[in-house]
Image (tube, rainbow, N blue to C red):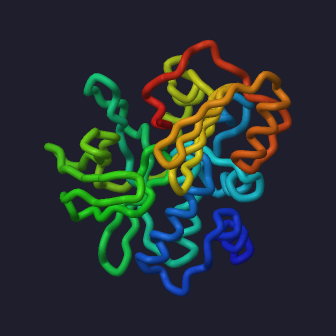
Amino acid sequence: MLDDAMVDAYLARIGAERPERADLAALTHLQERQVLSVPFENLGYHLDEPIHMDEQVLDKIVRQRRGGGCYEVNPALSFLLTALGYQVEILPGRVHRPGGTLGAALCHLALRVTVDGEQWLVDTGFGRNSRHPLRLDSREVQQDPDGEYRLADVEGGGFDVFLNGKPLYRLEDRPVRIEDFRPTLWWYRTAPESPFMQDVFCSLRTEDGRITLKGNQLSTVAGGERGSQEFGTDAAVLEAYKTYFGFSLDRLPDQPSGGVTAAVQTG
């Protein structure tokens, strides 16, 4: 359980106010503030940094003002929500790949949060996750600032999450422990075909778009308009991390030899 000092530091990190009670309005505020403040990034995989799923991840998210993948940012948020009085469970998922195939089990981690007897899907670690909680007992289209989301039951249990009619990932409805993801984390960190090892990316949602830095290429979406910029020096790339994402690095991540993979949901 986080102490009050860490709760306050976390809330300050994402620009959120401490809620008076653990209700849906506060949950919506907290999820949105995390989505708009904590980047979806894999820099640690290419900086030879440890990837923590337990409370050690809070040093990276809160103190270093960094981000991470679903194995980091969603557990971090779960620790905050639990400390604020929410009931939180971990749901395992499989990512829908191009061509209609499903990735391996336990390759995605999302949260189920119970509020006043109702269950909500909370996810801040997919790149194209919703900005607001999604009601788990609804199969209707749910409007979100970032699109139309819908949940659909699948044969054998679990459900698919769709964005604007396209499947994103499939979640099981039986909760698991964070420790259960350790074998897949090892695969993500070591396998040449791991999407996190094939590219270096850092992406942050904004109120009206997104900012993404891949290698030395910065791309922006703002109000439907797209822009791009290429940085010519390492110093300029390091400054871009500070300017656009709010953190400093001692050195640039190592660049992998592979290309961009569609399996990483940053678009």
Residue 190: horizontal and vertical position, in percent? 58, 24
The residue most toward the left is: 155
On the image, which quarter does residue 93 sit in? Answer: top left
Picture residue at 72% right of the left edge, 53% below the top: 65
* Residue 54 to residue 101: above or below: below
Instruction: Return the residue found at the far top.
Output: 257
Occupied quadrant, residue 23: bottom left
Position of residue 154 relative to residue 136, above or below, is: above
* Total numbered badges shown on the rendered structure: 0
Above or below, 206 against 102 in this view is below
**Residue in the image at 38% along x and 76% along y:** 115
Residue positioned 51% across, 53% down in the render:
208
17 or 103, nearer to the observer: 17
Q: Residue at x 44, y 77 (%)?
A: 25
Instruction: Pick the quarter of the image with the N terminus.
Output: bottom right
- In the rendered structure, the answer to whether residue 145 lies left or right of residue 156 reads right
| Horizontal and vertical percent position of residue 3 | 69, 74
Q: Residue 214 location, x and y as percent? A: 63, 29
